[in-house]
Image (cartoon, rainbow, N blue to C red):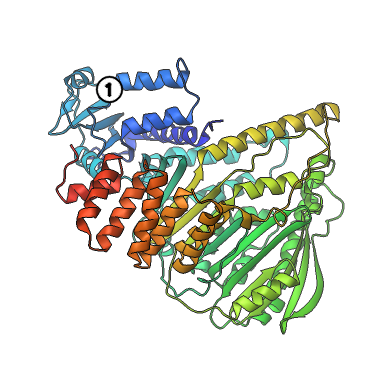
Amino acid sequence: MKTKLSTWIALGMIVFLTAGFMASAAKAQDEAGQGPQLLIMIRNIDQLLNDVERLMPSGEGSATTQQMAMLRGMLQGTDWIDPERSIVLGMDTRGDASSWIALIPFRTANANFQMAYSAIAGEDYYLTAFPPQPGFALGPGIKERLLNASTAPAASSLVVEAAASELLAIAQPKIEAAIASRAAAPSPQGQPSMMSPEETQAMLTEMLKTFEQVEILRLGLDLEGDLFTLQFDVDALPNSFLAGLLIDRGDDVRLADYEVDMPLQFRSRAYNVPGMMQLLESGLGEIYRQMGIDFDDLATMTKSFTGEMVGGMTAAPSGMTYEMIYVLAPGTDGEDFIINTYLPWFERYNLQMAAFVAQQANKPQAPTLYERTADSIVAGVKVVGVKTNYNAMLPPGDQNLAALASGGQIFETRLAAVDDFLLMTSNDAAMGDLIARARGFETAPAQGPMAEFELDLGALIEAMQAMMPPGGTAIDWPTDLGDVTMKAEMQNGQLATRTRFNIDDMGKMSAAFTALSARQAAVTASGTPAGATPPKPVATMDQRQPEAHPGHWYRRGGLHSAYGAYKAAATSYRKAIELSPRYADAHFQLGVVYGEMRQFEPAIRAMTRAIDLDDDKSAYYYGRGRVYLLAGEEEQAMRDFMEAGFLGNRDARAYLKEAGVSLE
């Protein structure tokens, strides 16, 4: 089942709404202008249209197919457009008028297109206005901005780039009026709001101050094979508070050798924790305060952390199991921090949350969310325990939700300190393993992304299925799912994130949740779902033996490789190949890590095997070409680059173009 990709719809709404603000605020812009504040860049329009047809329900006579055919007709075909440069649309606002200006790069001129859209012809591009305007005039600097954007390397197939601070300055009067109007509006049906109108207005105003520090906001969508990538970038204004936060300090790392083998994994390197808390407080502090939470107390507690941490979680019917390690700031006594700072804060926080829950649910007495459990000694280290009961936060009367959460909302936490590490696990056995590992950590130069997140969708679905209440209509939950990954980098006032997932996985999950919704609707309507059958036994994460699956070892190899542990990565990829000898991607990635270790002969053998198994992947040829180049075999490398280029590999084409080699 193909995903409906609500992300595309959301992106279209962003463009539409931003355009509306631009048009309505046009009078505020200086007549001189500085070029478009909103750009849309489309790399390889033909490929993008093909991708849309893949993503949306299509076929002969379908609405999607008809719309794509109409778009190709409007463009007078796509074979004349240069796929190596981007089509760029920019919103031009001058005086009381606003319009879209488009730059279409071409490799062969198209007189029909030029005539149909009253386009101005450049050396190898057309400029046209939408709606078409014969003899239209360009504002100062607009053509240069569009040309630069067209030739700049594109990170995604579709990119929307907004000059955020300029847009806010143009639209500020209308935005402030909207905030004031929203703050003054009565609560729906006369119900009291959590925040007063004045508090709402103050919070939104503070959030605007943060957005005013954003010079460029960039959203991008890309599809390569079945892998969908969402790009989100922020470029802060130079010398702003935000720019000072978005910096990779390059601190040495302590946890490079710590790897978590759990369905949910996350890690980060050191960053400016107090500064980030200050940024969070400016936007959301009022909400925390309305919940009775002392944000200043929270900020004070977090000053003891460097920001470097690694953790993971696993869900099962018996509850959550997890392990986390945080690096404490220099000079922090770990055991003293746990006893005299962290635990008192944690108790205050849970008391505040309990009071808020009681208030929102009109309960006469606040539920007990937190209690201390018995301390212990593990591997010679004092371990303290706490238990948090999130079942007490469930609203009364919602039996389905309570049943769904039964057994899975009690969090047991064990805490200990070793050197400058704060360790957290769900039981003492795991704590013993973690203490032993923490004692062997060594300092290493900064490596890997600033932050990384990985979620095993198949394991998540299994955990949810295992936690479902007994009985009910059987649902065909998908199990052959991959991962959702997110990586973030901060450098020189810029934040760049990439979130990736398999589009077919999203379709399978959508179908499963649709079935779950239908089942819950049947329960609500009749009390007993029609055709109820006993639930199928479900294996937990501990029972399903993930090490028996090649995908498990392939993902481990990727994690090892991302952090430069190439020997461990090679071992994991070899294990994946042992379990699935025709796993082409595993052979290729094994070749990649051999190449990183300068072992060129085994690298070439592994990549050649990947090509033998799947000779249509341009990345395989390009990767082998890079290894040949490193090994000094330039003739072989050029052959592979040529083959990769013929298959459409952008990196190979760029290399060949730089080398003066034409594929025509």
Residue pushed farthest top? 61
Residue under the image location 35 percent in, 22 percent down: 71
Q: Nearer the viewer, residue 245 or 401?
A: 401
Residue 519 placement, left or right of 126? right
Examine the rendering and report whether any part of residue 217 can be seen: no
Residue 621 placement, left or right of 194? left
Report x, y in % for residue 174: 44, 37
Residue under the image location 33 percent in, 59 percent down: 238
Residue on which disc 1 sits: 77
Q: Nearer the viewer, residue 81 or 60?
A: 60
Residue under the image location 56 percent in, 50 percent down: 203
- The C terminus lies in which quarter of the figure? top left
Report x, y in % for residue 544: 69, 53
Residue under the image location 68 percent in, 72 percent down: 342
Q: Nearer the viewer, residue 494 or 433?
A: 433
Examine the rendering and report whether any part of residue 168 can be seen: yes
**Kind of residue at disc 1:** Gly
Q: Alpha-carbon neighbours of circle 1 within 10 Å: few (<14), some, or many (≥20)?
A: some
- The N terminus lies in which quarter of the figure? top right
Report x, y in % for residue 124: 15, 33
Secondary structure category for the residue under label 1: loop
Q: Is residue 338 above or below residue 551?
A: below
Location of residue 509 by image quarter = top right
Location of residue 440 by image quarter = bottom right
